[in-house]
């Protein structure tokens, strides 16, 4: 066996490998498992590549962008389209847009957290059409963009890896331009670099990773162990005589599935989750091991990489199956931390007696990864709505022999307005959860608090434990709703949104990845439901019905509290209903559906608090009116499925139930004239808004674009 050591920074930079030009390119692999060779051999160090790779179809190295320091505040590019200019400065409409952006995009920190990433995706490297490239070439281009990001907007990579809000904003904006880039950046900066920094950052030189001489990846799940990754079977045997480890895949079901480990994009190093087996044969639970995977010549000895078929996306990731055959690792490969430590003689120490808790602490960066998925989802929802509203404003249909914009038709614009309200809500929920996560888990600043005498009372902020579960629910909630929004927007744009030049054709499929990544939505929601059952929310407030209850936001929030209480009780009753056989499994099956409804309402309440807290900080009268109407519409849409329970428990009268539809229709009428203004506030870059086809003879033009 060959000992794989951490890569070191070379004195000179080798010539980069030319990226593959066909999608069937398969990286070289080593000979399958056989009889292990003697353990004492010469260590191998993976050489480092250049920072950038050639553009697809070329043979020479691409120039490295000039590095610059972390960008400070600067003007954002204007989110307009050639046909829908924003209102002139000084007008009421311009003031509303500016105020809404201030509320949606972190206030005074907008130019620090969002503007750099937004400007990045308007760089020419992100605007060049690439639908003519093969999947392998498009993947290579995404890696090139990662190098460009690292050399420019990222600033100090280690600082970025320790800043949850900048990491989330990275996903929020890059995801709409290159979903593979967002994935690769999230893996490298958050899961890989972030995990290294959370453990023993001073034990090793991180330069190969901060300069992207080696791209980092993260290998946890296996073919036979996805959501039950705590039962993974890859092993790492410790040898106290040398301090080294032997990393091994015991059978095909333990193959690592499906991180980006191929040779596309250049050399890679992985953090591999494996069971630490000490010299006495004791399984010490799952730990992470820093493992170089390959260099420009192919995988290192004992490492076998099988590329998976590319997904049919504009920017596919190089997913693969990865196995290890008695791969030797140095003593420094094991990531050590205060909660788990192995002495040189093989004695294991831990502060967490529960192996599951120790494993979750070790991979804690997955929690922030959930919020990165939420960020990508909310950014995609905003992009989809902007494109769909722009299309509705400029595409005409004939009504009584008169060309009429699609947006004038209620059947067309009502779903867009509903989704606009939801998108505002999702964006503010994401900010709410991210701010509390940063505060509790990364020593971040205290999230914004309500003013002394808020017009709209809100619930107490979540505790550290509540924030942990809210993070999972926010990820599930935002990605689920974003998929619904992008699907509707694609439908509202007809055949034009099926053409490759239109990102709407792919947004929904891109979001499928966010629904599964960092924890499958269904599983993480059910896990959060068990927490809610063990820690029930306070009883709903007892209040009288106010005048005009369907437009009273506080009353509507109280109705959500009542609905959550009803479904919480139903879940408990289902758990105690006799089943046959009467086992924990059958009891939980009995309670699963009401538990999912309970958690959905719980997340909706947190979303409502985020909306109301934002309203409490909205000072401009017109802006306040628009946001209040959006909140009103969102709450009525969320309450409508639960009106039978609210009627049955006398929290809603039949008269008010019958008025819900009328009130929603009135809100559609009120908001429709401001649809374009409210969409401009989403700040989507006009460079990523495709131009609708002409209204006369335009279909052929559109399909030949």
Image: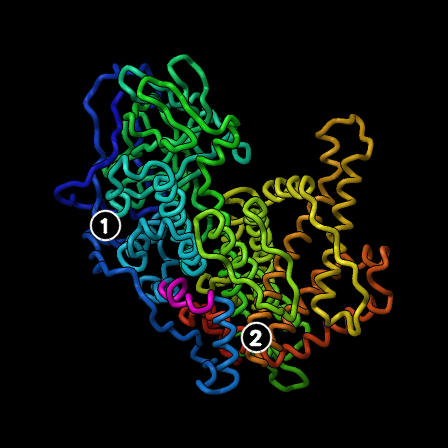
Q: In which quarter of the image is the N terminus?
A: top left
Determine crowd level at label 2: few under 14, some 14-19, many 20+ residues with C-alpha closer than 10 A.
many
The image shows residue 494 at horizontal and vertical percentages of 57, 67
Q: Which of 430 and 144 is in front in this view?
A: 430
Dividing the picture into quarters, in which one does residue 153 lie?
Answer: bottom left
The image shows residue 233 at horizontal and vertical percentages of 47, 24
Q: In which quarter of the image is the C terminus?
A: bottom left
Q: Which of 441 and 252 is in front in this view?
A: 441
Give the residue pinned by disc 1.
51
Q: Residue placed farthest to the top in the image?
A: 280
The image shows residue 287 at horizontal and vertical percentages of 41, 29
Q: Residue placed farthest to the left in the image?
A: 11
Q: Let me know if residue 314 appears in the view.
A: no
Give the residue pinned by disc 2.
392
Q: Give the range drawn in magenta.
A: 106-116
In this rendering, would 649 be left or right of 236? right
- Who's the residue at 37% across and 35% down the image? 271
């Amino acid at each position: 066996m060959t000992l794989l050591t951490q890569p070191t920074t070379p004195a000179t930079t080798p010539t980069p490998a030319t990226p593959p030009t066909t999608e069937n390119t398969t990286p070289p692999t080593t000979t399958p498992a056989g009889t292990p060779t003697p353990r004492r051999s010469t260590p191998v160090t993976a050489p480092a590549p250049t920072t950038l790779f050639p553009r697809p179809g070329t043979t020479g190295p691409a120039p490295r962008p000039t590095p610059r320091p972390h960008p400070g505040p600067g003007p954002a590019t204007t989110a307009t389209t050639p046909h829908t200019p924003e209102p002139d400065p000084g007008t009421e409409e311009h003031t509303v847009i500016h105020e809404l952006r201030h509320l949606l995009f972190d206030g005074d920190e907008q130019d620090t957290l969002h503007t750099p990433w937004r400007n990045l995706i308007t760089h020419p490297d992100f605007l060049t059409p690439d639908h003519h490239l093969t999947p392998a070439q498009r993947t290579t281009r995404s890696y090139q963009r990662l190098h460009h990001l690292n050399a420019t907007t990222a600033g100090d990579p280690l600082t970025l890896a320790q800043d949850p809000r900048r990491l989330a904003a990275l996903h929020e904006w890059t995801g709409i331009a290159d979903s593979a880039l967002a994935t690769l950046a999230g893996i490298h900066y958050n899961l890989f670099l972030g995990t290294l920094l959370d453990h023993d950052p001073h034990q090793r030189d991180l330069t190969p990773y901060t300069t992207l001489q080696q791209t980092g990846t993260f290998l946890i799940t296996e073919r036979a162990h996805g959501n039950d990754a705590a039962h993974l079977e890859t092993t790492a045997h410790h040898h106290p005589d040398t301090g080294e480890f032997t990393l091994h895949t015991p059978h095909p079901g333990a193959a690592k599935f499906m991180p980006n480990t191929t040779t596309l994009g250049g050399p890679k190093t992985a953090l591999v989750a494996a069971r630490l087996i000490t010299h006495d044969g004791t399984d010490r639970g799952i730990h992470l091991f820093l493992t170089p995977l390959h260099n420009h010549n192919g995988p290192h000895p004992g490492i076998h990489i099988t590329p998976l078929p590319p997904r049919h996306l504009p920017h596919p990731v190089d997913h693969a199956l990865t196995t290890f055959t008695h791969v030797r690792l140095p003593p420094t490969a094991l990531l050590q931390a205060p909660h788990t430590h192995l002495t040189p003689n093989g004695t294991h120490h831990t502060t967490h007696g529960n192996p599951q808790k120790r494993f979750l602490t070790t991979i804690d960066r997955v929690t922030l990864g959930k919020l990165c998925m939420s960020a990508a989802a909310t950014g995609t929802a905003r992009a989809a709505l902007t494109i769909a509203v722009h299309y509705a404003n400029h595409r005409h249909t004939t009504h009584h022999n008169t060309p009429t914009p699609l947006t004038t038709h209620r059947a067309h614009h009502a779903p867009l307005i509903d989704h606009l309200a939801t998108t505002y809500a999702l964006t503010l929920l994401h900010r709410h959860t991210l701010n509390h996560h940063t505060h509790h888990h990364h020593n971040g600043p205290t999230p914004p608090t309500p003013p002394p005498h808020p017009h709209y009372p809100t619930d107490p902020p979540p505790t550290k434990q509540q924030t942990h579960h809210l993070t999972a629910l926010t990820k599930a909630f935002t990605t689920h709703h974003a998929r619904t929004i992008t699907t509707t927007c694609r439908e509202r744009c007809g055949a034009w949104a099926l053409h490759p030049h239109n990102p709407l054709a792919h947004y929904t499929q891109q979001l499928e990845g966010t629904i599964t990544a960092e924890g499958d939505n269904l599983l993480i929601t059910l896990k959060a439901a068990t927490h809610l059952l063990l820690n029930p929310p306070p009883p709903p407030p007892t209040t009288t019905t106010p005048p005009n209850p369907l437009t009273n936001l506080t009353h509507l929030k109280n109705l959500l509290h009542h609905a959550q209480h009803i479904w919480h009780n139903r879940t408990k009753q289902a758990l105690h209903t006799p089943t046959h056989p009467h086992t924990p499994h059958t009891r939980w099956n009995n309670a699963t559906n009401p538990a999912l409804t309970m958690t959905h309402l719980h997340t909706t309440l947190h979303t409502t608090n985020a909306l109301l807290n934002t309203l409490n900080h909205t000072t401009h009268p017109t802006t306040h009116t628009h946001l209040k109407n959006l909140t009103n519409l969102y709450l009525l849409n969320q309450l409508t499925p639960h009106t039978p329970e609210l009627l049955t428990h006398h929290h809603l009268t039949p008269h008010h139930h019958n008025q819900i539809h009328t009130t929603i229709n009135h809100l559609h009428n009120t908001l429709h004239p401001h649809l374009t203004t409210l969409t401009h506030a989403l700040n989507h870059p006009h460079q990523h808004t495709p131009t609708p086809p002409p209204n006369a003879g335009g279909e052929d033009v559109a399909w030949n674009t």
